[in-house]
């Protein structure tokens, strides 16, 4: 007999804040915000004490300061959060055979077949306790037959709790909740539905799927299904994740480090744009060079989660320096990005002021419309000129 599906969703509570509080206990039990320094920064994470005052992640920092002038504002430390995220991932990988890392502090695990539902619940509860003990970080769990219902259950369990929805109970569990609590519900559809008076999931459950599909297309159909507790998306473990890579084989082998670097920048920009268009950040970068005698060398490095061209260019450049040690010509150069998590556009969060993020968005828009060559950094522009002169 096939076991019922069982999907566990794990989400660290106010992750950045909790990591700061673990580092410095004086930060506990007080309104604490993590955000950037610029006037246009947003709140990246806030403590529950701040939440009770109406502060939310994504809110402009200036608004948050007005709501709570005594809140302590810390500049985020993405290196520390990435290291902590890896620490959590390693702990979970040891104990969960099928683990998907969904974001820097969020995971799904497929527990199907684990001694049926109640065995799975027991396992999850023990795992949660051991995470709290070993990591000293608060975490919430949701357990149900699929990813969507489990994620919503986690939201209901927060802070520092767990909730399981037995198979068959999805519809009554979801019906009193707002449509907005459905993950990836899409702000456009939800506000249209709200204008029609459809605020609670219960109302959405009554609307025929065919109508949702006609009115809002594929996204509407999916939303209608999710409202009924239906979600076919499987848990995708790490090993099935693909990496993203780009490489260039030169017409004529190159030996000039500057020229190699320029090619590398073009590749890094191309991959950076791809990451951003997929709303992803990566935490591993590999640079590859192949010499003219076909000897191939690679170097990989773990980095803080990023999707910024600037960071990719910097790391790729440093790896190239370590790699390009022979005094011979190079025929191919490449970059591979891996260790992905999905991410909201976080670029401006800590280190990059908002205008830089706007610049990236504008560049990506132009590239999407007019192609990769439409906008280039000055260094890669030199290269383009040079190439066209060669032709
Ligand atoms: Mg979280």
Image: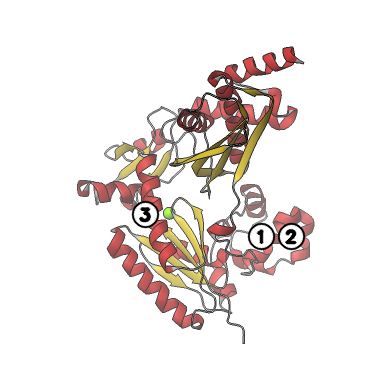
Q: Nearer the viewer, residue 51 or 383?
A: 383
Q: Distance between the residues labelled 2 and 1?
A: 8 Å
Q: Distance between the residues labelled 2 and 3?
A: 42 Å
Q: Does the residue at mark 2 contact the one at mark 1 (Cβ under 8 Å)?
A: yes
Query: Residue at position x 28%, y 64% from top?
Result: 133
The picture places residue 374, in percent across and down from the top left corner, at 70, 23
- Quarter occupied by residue 44: top left
Query: Which circle's residue, 1 or 3, is located before the other in the chain?
Result: 3
Q: How crowded is mark 3: few (under 14 residues within 10 Å), some or many (20 or more)?
A: few
Query: Which circle's residue, 2 or 1, is located before the other in the chain?
Result: 2
Q: How crowded is mark 1: few (under 14 residues within 10 Å), some or many (20 or more)?
A: many
Quarter of the picture containing the N terminus is bottom right
Query: Residue at position x 36%, y 38% from top?
Result: 76
Question: Which residue is identified by label 2?
Answer: 212
Question: Which residue is identified by label 1?
Answer: 223
Nearer the observer, disc 1 or disc 3?
A: 3
């Amino acid at each position: 007999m096939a076991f019922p599906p069982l999907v566990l969703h794990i989400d660290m509570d106010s992750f950045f804040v909790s990591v700061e509080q673990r580092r410095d206990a004086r930060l506990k039990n007080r309104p604490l915000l993590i955000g950037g320094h610029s006037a246009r920064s947003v709140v990246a994470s806030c403590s529950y004490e701040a939440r009770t005052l109406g502060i939310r992640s994504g809110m402009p920092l200036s608004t948050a300061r007005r709501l709570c002038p005594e809140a302590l504002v810390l500049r985020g430390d993405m290196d520390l959060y990435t290291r902590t995220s890896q620490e959590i991932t390693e702990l979970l990988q040891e104990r969960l055979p099928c683990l998907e890392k969904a974001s820097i502090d969020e995971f799904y695990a497929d527990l199907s077949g684990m001694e049926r539902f109640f065995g799975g619940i027991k396992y999850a509860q023990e795992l949660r306790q051991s995470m709290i003990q070993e990591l000293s970080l608060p975490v919430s769990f949701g357990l149900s037959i699929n990813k969507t219902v489990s994620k919503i259950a986690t939201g209901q369990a927060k802070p520092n709790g767990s909730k399981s929805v037995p198979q068959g109970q999805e519809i009554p569990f979801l019906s009193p909740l707002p449509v907005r609590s459905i993950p990836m519900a899409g702000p456009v559809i939800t506000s249209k539905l709200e204008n029609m008076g459809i605020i609670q999931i219960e109302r959405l459950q009554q609307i025929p799927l065919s109508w949702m599909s006609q009115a809002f297309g594929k996204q509407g159909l999916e939303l209608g299904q999710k409202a009924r507790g239906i979600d076919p998306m499987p848990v995708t473990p790490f090993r099935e994740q693909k990496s993203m890579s780009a490489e260039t084989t030169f017409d004529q082998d190159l030996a000039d480090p500057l020229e190699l670097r320029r090619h590398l920048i073009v590749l890094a920009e191309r991959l950076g744009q791809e990451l951003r268009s997929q709303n992803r950040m990566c935490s591993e970068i590999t640079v590859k060079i192949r010499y003219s005698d076909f000897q191939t060398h690679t170097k990989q490095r773990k980095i803080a989660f990023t999707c910024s061209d600037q960071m990719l260019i910097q790391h790729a450049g440093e790896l190239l320096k370590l790699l390009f040690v022979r005094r011979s010509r190079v025929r191919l150069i490449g970059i591979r990005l891996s260790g992905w998590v999905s991410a909201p556009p976080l670029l401006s969060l800590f280190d990059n002021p908002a205008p830089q993020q706007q610049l990236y968005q504008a560049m990506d828009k132009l590239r999407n419309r007019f192609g990769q060559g439409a906008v280039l950094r000055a260094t890669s522009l030199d290269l383009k000129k040079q190439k066209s002169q060669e032709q």
